[in-house]
Image (spheres, helix red, strand yellow):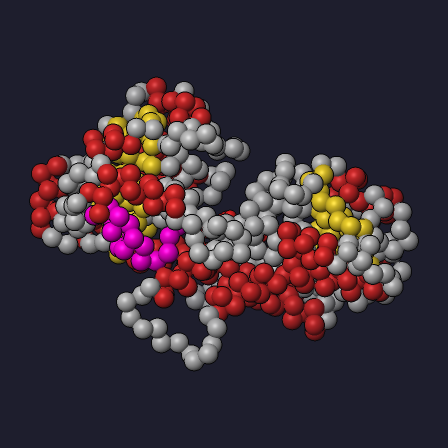
């Protein structure tokens, strides 16, 4: 931190003009909320005029949201701030030069599901664009999920290289990770506490000034930029760890012939200061683009750390082990399928499998890194004939997604519940039996959707995640 930057910012005065780079599900609500504050005079949303997303510019400037799905309050907020002239979308990145603060909300996907190296290409291009038009006294904030250490190294280096200015002396630099969930974008930005981490105190203070006006219930939690990066990746790493702990318990309960949900209720009953347990839910696997990747951001961040890590010799990171346990669950679902067919002297090869649920999360069309995909790959590899149903996912590369459940269940040997979509809770033994036409149909429940006894009594061969108390039932 230097006095020089503090003096430049004092001379410049309060933040009045803001730029948001990346008109996606993070950038659009953030920009609209900045524009809706009377603390600020103008917000520019920057969007590359590319074939795939250039259309967003005109939509936003007409006060329309280009985002899919319901976002309560967003359309009217956009119309209000666009009509008042406080928010406009542009592809002219040179207008960054007229701003006091710029945030970057650009996706950091992974090249492919197997890749553990994030693709920072788009983010780097955005940072380079900011660097080209950076002026003394400006604040730059990264909102994307990034490997710990990135703000203070890669981002700082690109900005300094492009602008010839020095971070912490001529301009402020910070990380303020997004914590929004689709369907509640505006509410999350206003009500969640906001982690704000500068590369130095002056940068942190300037970023606090930027985000404070949009918070309603949320409070600011200031820290260093690297601590902010670690906070974001850790909150998803710990969630993944908690899920893995329950998945491992489910496997143990199956081996011990007991019901994991009884154990979960028992453990969850322990409440009180500091003794409550964070029990999540076992299931068919963990998908999405947050929990499947943020652990590896954190692990990479440790390798970039300035100090040597002291850790038990030859011990694997429990966080990476948690990822392995969660990624094992689709294989466990396959093993349960094979075991159930074997009870009927049937082979997986040639078995007709009805897979109910493709999306990675209940009642959603989001199919990023779905655990259903590795199951389908393994089952097809083993010679099964698998059909997929999902009420929300419209399409998926190289996978036919059926709209009608009966088209998938008809003649099936196995009915598999992979996603807890609410439609599946209405499944009855009679309805399924009438479609499969089998004396004994296999049903494998990956999300604790059905009541085992109703199906077992109707002649089904049942297997459920964590249901050691039912998985070896008598066949009726
Ligand atoms: N899952 C389980 N058991 C659980 C909870 C989830 O198996 O108890 C599985 C889900 O089936 C899904 C995956 O984990 O396949 C991820 O589920 P999620 O509820 O964590 O949803 P995400 O991946 O969209 O996580 C996001 C994250 N939000 C951000 O990164 C801003 C996460 O930090 C939030 O905690 C989560 O939403 C949320 O709570 O909605």
Q: Nearer the viewer, residue 296 or 463?
A: 296
Report the side of 34 relative to 431 (left or right).
left
Which contiguous range is marked in magenta? 145-160
Which residue is found at the position 75% from the left and 37% from the top? 404
Q: Is residue 28 above or below residue 348?
A: above
- State which quarter of the image contains the N terminus: bottom left
Report the side of 285 relative to 138 (left or right).
right
The percent coordinates of residue 14 (x first, y second) are 17, 36
Q: Is residue 261 visible?
A: no
Q: Quadrant of residue 59?
A: top left
Which residue is found at the position 61% from the left and 63% from the top? 328
The percent coordinates of residue 6 (x first, y second) are 11, 47
Report the side of 372 relative to 62 (left or right).
right
Q: Is residue 54 above or below residue 124?
A: above
Residue 147 inside the magenta-drawn segment? yes
Report the side of 298 relative to 400 (left or right).
left
Q: Is residue 248 visible?
A: yes
Q: Nearer the viewer, residue 86 or 372?
A: 372
The percent coordinates of residue 7 (x first, y second) are 8, 44
Q: Among all residues in the image, which is located at the extreme bottom?
A: 313
Q: Is residue 79 above or below residue 131?
A: above
Residue 81 inside the magenta-drawn segment? no
- State which quarter of the image contains the C terminus: bottom right
The percent coordinates of residue 226 (x first, y second) are 30, 57
Main secondary structure of the magenta stretch: helix
Which residue is found at the position 73% from the left and 62% from the top? 336
């Amino acid at each position: 931190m230097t006095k020089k930057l503090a003096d430049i910012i004092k001379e410049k005065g309060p933040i009045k003009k803001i730029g948001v780079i990346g008109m996606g599900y993070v950038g659009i609500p953030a920009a609209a909320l900045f524009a809706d504050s009377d603390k600020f005079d103008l917000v520019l949303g920057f969007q590359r005029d590319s074939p795939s997303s250039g259309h967003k510019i005109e939509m936003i400037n007409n006060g329309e949201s280009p985002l899919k799905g319901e976002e309560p309050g967003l359309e009217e907020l956009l119309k209000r701030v666009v009509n008042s002239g406080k928010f406009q979308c542009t592809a002219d990145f040179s207008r960054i030069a007229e701003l006091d603060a710029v945030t970057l909300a650009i996706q950091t996907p992974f090249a492919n599901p197997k890749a553990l190296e994030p693709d920072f290409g788009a983010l780097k291009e955005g940072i380079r664009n900011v660097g080209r038009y950076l002026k003394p006294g400006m604040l730059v904030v990264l909102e994307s999920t990034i490997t710990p250490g990135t703000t203070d190294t890669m981002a700082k280096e690109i900005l300094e290289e492009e602008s010839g200015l020095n971070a912490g002396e001529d301009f402020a630099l910070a990380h303020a990770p997004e914590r929004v969930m689709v369907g509640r974008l505006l509410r999350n930005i206003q009500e969640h506490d906001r982690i704000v981490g500068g590369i130095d105190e002056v940068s942190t203070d300037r970023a606090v000034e930027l985000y404070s006006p949009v918070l309603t219930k949320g409070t600011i939690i200031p820290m260093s930029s690297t601590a902010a990066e670690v906070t974001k990746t850790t909150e998803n790493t710990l969630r993944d760890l908690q899920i893995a702990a329950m998945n491992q318990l489910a496997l143990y309960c199956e081996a011990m012939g007991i019901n994991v949900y009884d154990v979960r209720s028992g453990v969850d009953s322990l409440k009180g200061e500091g003794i409550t347990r964070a029990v999540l839910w076992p299931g068919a696997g963990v998908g999405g683009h947050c929990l499947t990747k943020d652990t590896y951001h954190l692990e990479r961040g440790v390798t970039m750390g300035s100090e040597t890590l002291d850790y038990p010799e030859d011990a694997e990171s429990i966080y990476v082990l948690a990822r392995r346990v969660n990624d094992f669950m689709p294989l466990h679902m396959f093993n349960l399928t094979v075991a159930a067919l074997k009870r009927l002297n049937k082979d997986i090869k040639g078995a007709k499998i009805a897979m109910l649920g493709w999306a990675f999360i209940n009642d959603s069309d989001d199919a990023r890194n779905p655990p259903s995909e590795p199951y389908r790959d393994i089952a097809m590899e083993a010679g099964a004939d698998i059909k997929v149903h999902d009420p929300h996912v419209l399409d998926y590369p190289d996978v036919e997604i059926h709209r009608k459940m009966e088209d998938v269940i008809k003649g099936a040997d196995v009915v598999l519940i992979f996603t807890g979509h609410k439609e599946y809770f209405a499944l009855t033994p009679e309805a399924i039996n009438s479609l499969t036409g089998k004396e004994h149909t296999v049903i494998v429940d990956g999300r604790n959707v059905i009541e085992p006894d109703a199906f077992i009594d109707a002649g089904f061969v049942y297997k459920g995640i964590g249901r050691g108390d039912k998985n070896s039932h008598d066949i009726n």
